[in-house]
Image (tube, rainbow, N blue to C red):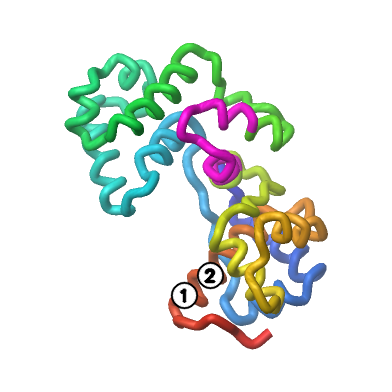
Amino acid sequence: MGLGAEQLAGAMAALTEREPAFARGVERAGAPAPRISPRGYATLLRTIVGQQVSVASAQAVFGRLEAMLGDVADPALLAGASDERLRACGLSRQKMGYARSLAGLVASGELDLARLPEDDEAAIAELVRIKGIGRWSAEIYLLFAEGRADVWPAGDLAVQIEVGRIMGLTARPDEKATRALAEAWRPHRGAAAIFAWHHYAWSTARKTDAVPL
């Protein structure tokens, strides 16, 4: 499972002690809540279903898949379902291909989600073998479902925006700069990402492009 409340709180305490900008951010926006997803195949399938559609649409499609398959956590059921049945649930041809890639790798045992490599980069390399799962999706899975404490999704636009805002930069840092900034936050970069999303939601709710730092 993802970073629990106690682990997240400890990581945030370390970050705020190390980086005054994070301490000021917590004073403004409060501490972030844990973001946890179940570990395993169903969470990655949900990720594929949710790509490039609204949250409501993704929930509707996933709900139809659950109803049609009976046990959405069994990859063999999706692997054996016809294109017609999957299309009726709302999956596009492309997403059917992605879902079948995932289901096939898991059902065959070629991808064992219970035994991903301990090294984060090696685990990401395993996950991106799945069609439709890129680096960002792999990082989010490792952070939310496995609780990997130092995963850093530097390519996430909201993370870039909010890191720039929290750190008082004049422009949004790109992925390379965001990755470089976070080197000082190891081994708590996962908590830093969770806080960046939390602070982004706080900032967006106030419709502001700048906060006093």
**What residue would you read off at disc 2?**
200
Which residue, as the protein is rendered here, is positioned at the far top? Answer: 108
Which x, y percent locates residue 204? 47, 75
Which range is magenta? 125-142
Camera-side residue: 145 or 204? 204
Q: Residue at x 77, y 63 (%)?
A: 14
Callout 2 touching callout 1 (CB < 8 Å): yes
User: What secondary structure is the magenta-colored segment mainly?
Assistant: helix
SS of the residue under disc 2? helix
Q: Residue at x 44, y 37 (%)?
A: 43
Relative placement, left or right, of 183 versus 178 is right
Which x, y percent locates residue 132? 46, 34
Q: Residue at x 50, y 83 (%)?
A: 208
Camera-side residue: 153 or 72? 153
**Badge 2 density bin: few <14, some 14–19, many ≥20, Cα 10 Å:** many
Which x, y percent locates residue 104? 43, 17
Camera-side residue: 133 or 74? 133
Question: How far apart, in angstroms, are the residues tagged by discs 2 and 1?
Answer: 6 Å
Hey, what amino acid is under mark 2? Answer: Tyr
**What residue would you read off at disc 1?**
204
Examine the image and state in which quarter residue 111 appears. Answer: top right
SS of the residue under disc 1? helix
In the displayed structure, 91 sits above or below 15; it is: above
